[in-house]
Amino acid sequence: MKDIPPKKRWQAVHGVLLLDKPGGMTSNAALQKARRLFSAAKAGHTGTLDPMATGLLPLCFGAATRFSADILRADKTYEAEICFGAMTDTGDREGQITRRAALPPDLADRIAGLLARFTGEQLQTPPMYSALKHNGRPLYELARQGVTVERAPRRVVFYALEPLSWASPRLSLRVKCSKGAYIRTLAGDLGQAADCGAHLTALRRVQVGALELRRAHTLEVLESLSENERLACIDAVDSLLATLPAIRLNTEAASRFLHGNPVPGVRAQAPDADGDVRVYQEHEQEGAQIFLGQGYFKPDGSLCPRRVKPVP
């Protein structure tokens, strides 16, 4: 009789894994592989990277999935390579070339001006080869069937477009942008402005909000670690909220907050906060604190919970 492999035993894992996603793998495939490595009962990613793209993919385990909304909306930073002189049907190197054109002789001198033209707020039309949905179906599925649908332009912001190197016909640059910006669309727009076409040949995400690629782990390294070493790679849940002001509550106020009630008298801890705050309970041990969740201040100055950790 054939041996039946033991059933996978999932466990409660809470925190954030900064993964350096490899190329050629979907974000969901990377998530599922990491989830199995940690035997995490609950997991989710914070925004997708195309299979071609590599770099920072924050993964949330357990209670961290409750606090991923801000990271989904966070600004992103990429390192990209764009090839001028050719357009593809997908806007990147994985598509079929649809047009070739000679590079203008003065293109190298025009790079700075082209990048300046696309810096700032822009109206950008999402590409057909994207995960956006139309009538419940991802656009890329329709695109593969030769179907094109109307896409409404959206406002995005390119905060900085910094050239890193130029080796004709390829431009390497660093892009800091808002949520919803497509770098492959930027490549196509730059190519159109240069009168020769262009497409994206490489993309690596290096920062999401305050989270940085330099602290990320590859799947290969994670696979080589022991279980305890692997678990040590997971950051605390509140690392997702590191840019928010912190509020600390005593035991009584912490209980009110966790049970959904407003807490008065703590506005002075963050008088300038005009958005959400991260909330902690002071611990008996000096300097220690327990993360409770994310809150906001009402006009009367009371602190209200927006999202809280599960109450044990």
Image (tube, rainbow, N blue to C red):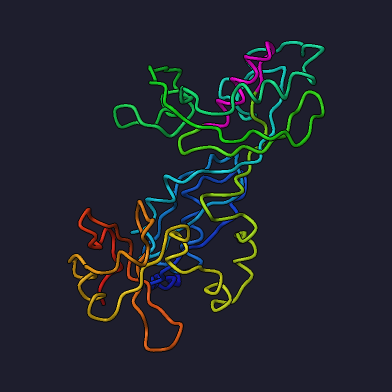
Of 260 and 218, nearer the camera is 260
Q: Is residue 293 left or right of residue 113?
A: left
Question: What is the quadrant of the C terminus in the image?
Answer: bottom left
Q: Is residue 85 left or right of residue 73?
A: right
Looking at the image, residue 113 lies above or below residue 17: above
Residue 104: image quadrant is top right
Q: Is residue 193 magenta?
A: yes
Is residue 18 part of the magenta span, yes or no?
no
Asked whether 149 or 304 is in front, the reply is: 304
The quadrant of the picture occupied by the N terminus is bottom left
Left or right, 224 with respect to 158, comes to right
Q: How many marks?
A: 0
Overall secondary structure of the magenta stretch? helix
Please provide percent x and percent y for residue 195.
68, 10
Residue 152 image position (x, y, % from top left): 38, 21
> In the image, what residue occupies the spot 33% across and 66% down?
268
Q: Nearer the viewer, residue 284 or 165?
A: 284
Q: Determine the residue positioned at 34% across, 31% down.
A: 137
**Residue 303 location, x and y as percent?**
25, 63
Q: Quadrant for residue 65, please give it.
A: bottom left
The image shows residue 153 at horizontal and vertical percentages of 42, 21
**What residue is at 54 percent from the left and 37 percent from the top?**
177
**Residue span colored magenta:** 182-198
Side of 163 relative to 70 (left or right):
right
Q: Residue 6's quadrant in the figure? A: bottom left
Q: Residue at horizontal 42%, vertical 89%?
A: 285
